[in-house]
Amino acid sequence: MLDYVELGADLDAEERMIRDTARDFVEERVKPDIGEHWIEGTFPTDLIGEMGEMGFYAPNLEGYGLPGVSETAYGLLMQELEAGDSGLRSMASVQGALVMYPIHAFGSDEQKEEWLPRLGTGEAVGCFGLTEPNHGSDPSSMETRAEREDRGYLLNGAKTWITNSPIADVAVVWARDRSADDAPVRGFLVETDRDGVTTNKLDEKLSLRASITGEIALNDVYVPEENVLPNVEGMKGPLSCLTQARYGIAWGAVGAARDAFETARQYALDREQFGGPIARFQLQQRKLAEMATQITTSQLLAHRLAELKERGDLRPQHVSMAKRNNVRMARDQSRIAREILGGNGITADYSPMRHMANLETVYTYEGTHDIHTLILGADLTGIQAFQ
Ligand SMILES: Cc1cc2nc3c(=O)[nH]c(=O)nc-3n(C[C@H](O)[C@H](O)[C@H](O)COP(=O)(O)OP(=O)(O)OC[C@H]3O[C@@H](n4cnc5c(N)ncnc54)[C@H](O)[C@@H]3O)c2cc1C
């Protein structure tokens, strides 16, 4: 596996063990049939519990049976899962960073006890409802609303593009609390079997096909007060979750690119044209050299993020830079890998084109590439260019 500047040499025993466990899992349990799932547009749901048993959901959190592994170990896990498929890493990111993290960070003791152990093992599945049909890049304009009713709230609105909503037991829904001054955004834990909740599946995606995506429609859905995340108010709630998930994406994208690279390198060595392997052509070597360099520099950025996160110095803007850079890198390099595979690269028998198509989603969700550019622009100049 490509590790050109020997970053693996600095890992501790636990980090190495988690990386290798995830790598073996992907090799044995994911790679054999992920291409078929991708073509069929299905997620290998039998892996949900298995991933839980292996501790793949939010292992960087502590308590409630969660081991609190290092941020490097968590990043390596995301890297290995996305070497399998971006849909697999999305499953772990949503469950861990977008559902378990807000419950862990902002939930009541009762909410933590009720949900964290079950989500951690994969016995329960969660989803994160922020995006709406009319509000994607600008979620603070959300229309989903909560109004006081008895000892709870009535929720109304619609969320779309929600990973795992059709199979979720609980949705973290972000809505404006219209009963409070200034209608702050608040997080609601909505069990999907409540009256008034529907979660239609979105089909016909041409990207992230091995991942279940749906809507969440909320029609007069009553949730008791105990279902409100008590310890956060405002956009800080959803945005802090996104920072956690984007951190995992910055690592994960490198895994997709690395898998595309390894596939292309092997293919170039095996495939013969004009009387010998295509790897002997300078044009192909240049592509491999560029790919290896881009992957290595992105790996370095991911490792640096882990150091900053570990010591509490990671800013959301650091994460924006890494998400933006590493996903663009993976999107570009998986296309070059596909090129090296010629016509065979157009099939699902090889991973590069599947990664390439998946990365269109990864480039778009969790803040589009453009939005991260604006976040960095604002940080560098002090001038917001969003509107
Ligand atoms: C497969 C998939 C899974 C997803 N999973 C989830 C999930 O689990 N939960 C969830 O809440 N959401 C999820 N999303 C939604 C995702 O986060 C949004 O698609 C994303 O935020 C972009 O929003 P949008 O699609 O409405 O695009 P828009 O916001 O309409 O953007 C359209 C284009 O305009 C550009 N643009 C927007 N604003 C500006 C600006 N100010 N300046 C310059 N350009 C701008 C964008 O960069 C983009 O190119 C998922 C999306 C996909 C595709």
Image (spheres, rainbow, N blue to C red):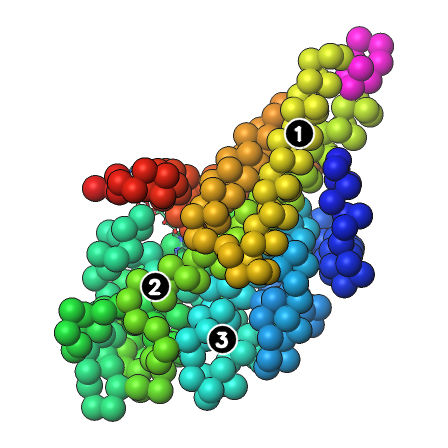
> Given contact means CB atoms under 8 Å apart, are the residues at marks 3 and 2 in contact?
no
Please say whether residue 259 is visible from this viewpoint: yes
Which of the two discs, 1 and 2, labels the residue nearer the N terminus?
2
Report, in whole angstroms, how far the alpha carbon at label 1 lies from the one at label 2.
36 Å
- The residue closer to the viewer here, 150 or 19, is 19
In the picture, measured across the screen, residue 96 lies left or right of residue 320, that is right
Report, in whole angstroms, how far the alpha carbon at label 3 lies from the one at label 2.
15 Å
Q: Which residue is mark 2?
A: 236
Q: Residue at x 55, y 34 (%)?
A: 329
In the picture, measured across the screen, residue 58 lies left or right of residue 9, that is left
Instruction: Bin the neighbour count of mark 1 within 10 Å (Cα to Cα): few under 14, some 14-19, many 20 and up.
Output: few
Q: Secondary structure at mark 3?
A: helix
Q: What is the span of residues highlighted in magenta in the rendered image? A: 272-280
Q: Which residue is mark 1?
A: 293
Magenta highlight on residue 170: no
Q: Amino acid at mark 2?
A: Lys
Residue 252, given in percent of the width and then of the height, sits at 59, 48
Magenta highlight on residue 278: yes
